[in-house]
Amino acid sequence: MAGTQAIDYTALAPALVVAVTALGVLVLDLFLPAGRKVVAAWAGTGGLVVALATLLPLVGDTRRTFCVPATNVDPVSCSYVVDHLTLVFQVLVLAGAVVVMLLSLDTLRDSRIPAGEYSFLLLSSVAGAVTLAASRDILTLVVALEVVSLPAFALVALRRFDSRSSEAALKLFLVSVVSTAVMLFGLSLVYGTTGAVHLDRIASALARSDGRLPATVLGVTLSLAGFGFKVAAVPFHFWAPDTYSGAPVPVAAYLSVVSKAAGFVGLAVLLTRGFGPYADVWAPAVAVIAALTMTVGNLAALRQRSAVRLLAWSSIAQSGYMLVPLGSAAHGAGSVDAVLPATVAYVLAYAVMNLGAFSVVTLVGRHRPRNAIEDYRGLGRTEPLTAFALAFALACLAGLPPGLLGLFAKVVVFQAPVEQGVGWLAVVMAVNVVIGLYYYLAWAAALYARPAEGARPPSYRISWSDGLAIGITLGAAVWLSVLPRMVLEALR
Amino acid sequence: MSVVEVLFVLLGIVAVGSALLVVTTNQLVHAALWLVVCLGSVAGCYLLLSAEFVAWVQVLIYVGAVVVLLLFGLMLTRAPIGASTDLDAGLGQRAVAALTAGGLAGIVITALVDAFSGERIDLGGDVSTGSSASAGSALFRGWVLPFEVLSLLLLAALVGAIVLSRRDVGVEPEAADGGPT
């Protein structure tokens, strides 16, 4: 190990700004009078916007820091790399977190949830997600993944007046701990057989080894578990529906978009940059997980009556679509790099459309805590703009015009198994998209249906923070439906 | 076999035996104490492999902190500390658990033996890689990033635990049904 190393603070800035804001919010909270605690959440939102701005100098450049010197077989390897993939996910994570914070402002003002601690925990988790996107060695990757998860347990449990909340947090905690333990065991096996922790060195060690060592195969397979939990893939999905419905709705939105995106970037980086040479081992496993995840998620979503639970199961199904490109890698050289853009494109599109749906669901849930699908009947008559935002997000999730964003993203994902020759996966996906149409459209139709006899049609005064969140997500969804190249070619 | 190898095998037997006792005893406090024996003998294994720093961290953190935390948890929550039969699962569940554990152990042992059966660790040569000095300089030179990220994790865990035990956030707010329109 060489002596001192220069640290590239420009590359680290986004993560640093978020972490420092988190600490600042915690201190600020001490000095705020009891009725003004929500100011801490404002400060947190501001910090996230500043962090977004610090991404600007990094565009179009690849920066590396925390490097180890070259050895006689390996070149210089770095732990923290800001490249195009990193930037795309950091923008997603930070922008998603801004929307979640906007949605949280009214929740924090109206409930007993402590605003300072809430903002601190959320920002710590975001700092973990920002670091995760840039991590290029397994130690940083695991630590960052835990930083994303751990504050989420506390966030989910914050509605302590509701017993469902504690149950939700406990479920999330147990599944997380078990899957992390399994993943650590797998990664330690990989380290044992390759002797490397940097992903590029693991890749070159795996490429050098001839044949398939059973211990490495086991390690690679077990490593999938931790990320499988994070993205709520079957069979690690049990926590999702209960956790989403027990948590405050903005936290559910956070788990389903920001935390899931973090899981996907970790998985994508680990599989493509680290385990690339073993693609023929993990790709079939990922393909089976993808098929199961789509099918289980969609079939369960068909039977849901509650809006949040429906979105929970639908987000499980959507995870399945995102895994499809990764699952179809391995058939042919260079296919690992060929499928990555499709997954990234779908994660981006999903984030926009799911946040759009969650924004409206948060708003309705604020007035109708039961948040059942029936509560949305007739929303289109009294709140045309809000209803349109939700209907558009649902059309995107279903992949139907006018939701072109979802349609294009699905086509890109669909191309991957077709081009790589994994026909069965393409068929499973096509069937699932059709199943998904039913429940998304049923919900969208309820928005414009005649309200039930005697029921008061929902009508709300929308606060400007909610309005801004709905506006941002709707604007992004419409804009990206018109100009989908930004998402579809994010990596090209 | 050299002295080190004999000691290693003995410590290994103690570790596996006490680990089995941890999961089979129906006295919760005994289980915690067997865990001390198990973790302690693993620390001994590390010491034999000249991983001095890891061995003492194992003693400090696992034996010292984790088990004591467990015992404190038992005492402070007034959990039953005598023999309790409700810790035993039904026969069917035991069979499934034994099958899963046995199968997993079989796979893992096969894979490990296949990968590392011929490997030798030379303990006579340079043993400085396991010392506190080399661990410390590796941590603060090469691995300062995950180290700092971990500090954020610990702070978040601390704040999370405090906020969840605060009494004033557990109050039912005014019935929000219907809500302001």
Image: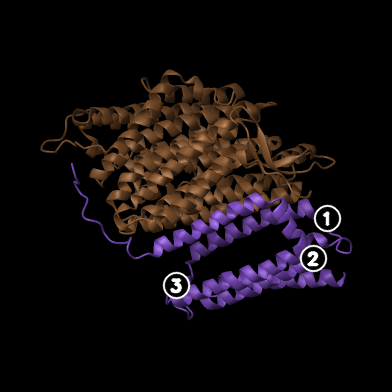
Q: Say which element carries label 3.
A: helix
Chain to which mark 1 belongs = B
Residue B62 visible within the image: yes
Kindly state the secondary structure of the residue where label 2 is placed. loop
**Host chain of mark 2:** B
Residue at the limit of the structure toward the right, as seen here? B125
**Colour applied to chain A:** brown
Please state which amino acid type lies under the numbered disc 1.
Answer: Glu
Neighbours of disc 1 within 10 Å: few (<14), some (14-19), many (20+): few
- Disc 3 + disc 1, Cβ < 8 Å: no
| Residue B50: image tag | 2
Lower sequence index among marks 3 and 2: 2
Residue in the foreground of this view, choosing between B32 and B77: B77
Mark in front: 3 vs 2: 2
Name the residue at the left extreme: A454
C-beta proximity under 8 Å, tags 1 and 2: no
At a point 52% along the width and 58% down the height, the residue shown is B155
Per the model, the C-alpha gap separating discs 1 and 2 is 16 Å
Q: Amino acid at mark 3?
A: Asp
Vertical position of residue A87 compared to residue B179: above or below: above
Q: CA distance from mark 3 to mark 1?
A: 45 Å
Q: Determine which of the numbered discs, if any, sits on residue B86 in the image.
A: 3
Q: Can you give x and y, in whole percent of width and height, for residue A314 in the image?
A: 40, 37
Q: Nearer the viewer, residue A413 or A472?
A: A472
Q: What is the quadrant of residue A373 in the picture? A: top left
Q: Tag 2 or tag 1, which sits nearer the N-term?
A: 2
The tag on residue B119 is 1
**Which amino acid, mark 2?**
Ser
Q: Are marks 3 and 2 in contact (CB under 8 Å)?
A: no
